Image (cartoon, rainbow, N blue to C red):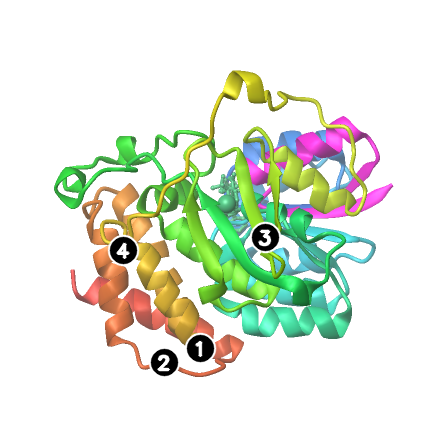
Amino acid sequence: MKKIAILGSTGSIGTQTLEVARENGDIEITGLAAGSNIALLEKQIREFTPKLAAVWSEEKAQGLRMRVADTNTEIVSGMDGLLEVSTLGDTEILVTAVVGMIGIRPTIEAIKAGKDIALANKETLVTAGHIIMPLAGEKRVSILPVDSEHSAIFQSLQGNEPKAVHKILLTASGGPFRGKKEEELMEIRVEDALKHPNWSMGQKITIDSSTMVNKGLEVIEAKWLFGVDVDHVQVVVQPQSIIHSMVEYVDGAVMAQLGTPDMKLPIQYALYYPQRRYLPGERLDFLSLGKLDFEKPDMDTFYGLKLAYEAGRAGGSLPTVFNAANELAVRMFLNREIKFLEIVEIIEDCMKAHQNIENPSLQQILDVETATYDRIRSRR
Ligand code: NDP
Ligand code: MG
């Protein structure tokens, strides 16, 4: 039995990870952590019988404690609870599927405790990649990508020498507003932005996909996962989301991973790497597909992507500003406090105002996050 714990078990990636565990039948769930959906967490506790489950608020944890008093699962709460689930004794792999840079401390502590990380939570790597990657090397733990593009890159790297990589071709669907210009984006409503053409995902990443900030985060994520600078990561729009990403080698060969859009493939690949397992589901049928399209990303309209390159190139604390500003701006957009185009305007404003800190410590990253939030709130 493979022993895994999941942070964000009630979310899109979390529930699909549990489906993979259910379908394979040889995974033991040691710990689960969720934000507030205790009804679903209770079901998961009853089905998967983890030793420990964490809920963010202590009040909700108390409610859950009563509901599952007849089970052997201990309920914990807050950041301490998240850290406990992340470092549980016999866990082999921690799946990080919480949303946002709240995942930084749990990820760091899990690595220190020797856990391999199946990483979905890209915001953590974007803001603290310079801490996490060397630490993972030192502790000899693997950071296994769950993000579909990065899994595709990882799969395309198998059997090849890292030094033979010429560049990474990161594919993008272009999101629901591909081809639109600024004038057409002014009155975009939350409901419009939540309609992704190819993937069903959590709300935050769906909005990120509609602004292309998600692709920007992924460029920086690729920088850390694969040790390349951002200018060796080229974004290619592939609207059908069939080519999940590619690697070009020095001899001109391009290796790609293709498939129907299904997150269970990268999740399962991360959990069983280097093994490939049967995965039920729709198969790619090239004859009915007919053709694949490619486009250049429109970085003038979707300039959040351009800002991500800037942040990734500069490094230091600028990626934290990029990410934190986006996290709060997306929350405000979802709460209908700001307009769609203001998301990226806010990111740009925060980046312009920031004094970059080279090689920031964990505390400095968290302070920059707070300062970024304060700036956004004080200006509205
Ligand atoms: P969801 O919003 O669907 O799920 C987020 C999960 O995190 C939920 O289980 C939520 O709990 C939990 N959570 C939120 N806040 C806390 C907290 N303070 N403490 C503990 N748990 C918390 O997000 P996704 O699954 O879509 O995304 C998760 C991560 O994976 C993101 O970083 C995203 O960018 C990345 N990713 C997602 C993909 C996808 O297909 N969805 C693809 C590639 C990457 P609750 O709901 O109970 O409040
Ligand atoms: Mg992705």
Task: Find residue 284 and report its image quarter.
Answer: top right
Q: Which residue is mark 1?
A: 316
Q: Amino acid at mark 2?
A: Asn
Q: Which residues are magenta?
A: 1-30
Q: Are marks 1 and 2 in contact (CB under 8 Å)?
A: yes
Residue shown at the point (35%, 68%) measured from the top left: 310
Q: Amino acid at mark 3?
A: Val
Q: Which residue is mark 3?
A: 247
Q: Are marks 4 and 3 in contact (CB under 8 Å)?
A: no
Image-based side of 56 in relation to 67, left or right: left
Q: Amino acid at mark 1?
A: Gly
N-term mark: 4 or 3: 3
- Coordinates of residue 234 in the picture (x, y in percent): 45, 56
Q: Which residue is mark 4?
A: 303
Residue closest to the eye, 154 or 211: 154
Q: CA distance from mark 3 to mark 1?
A: 26 Å
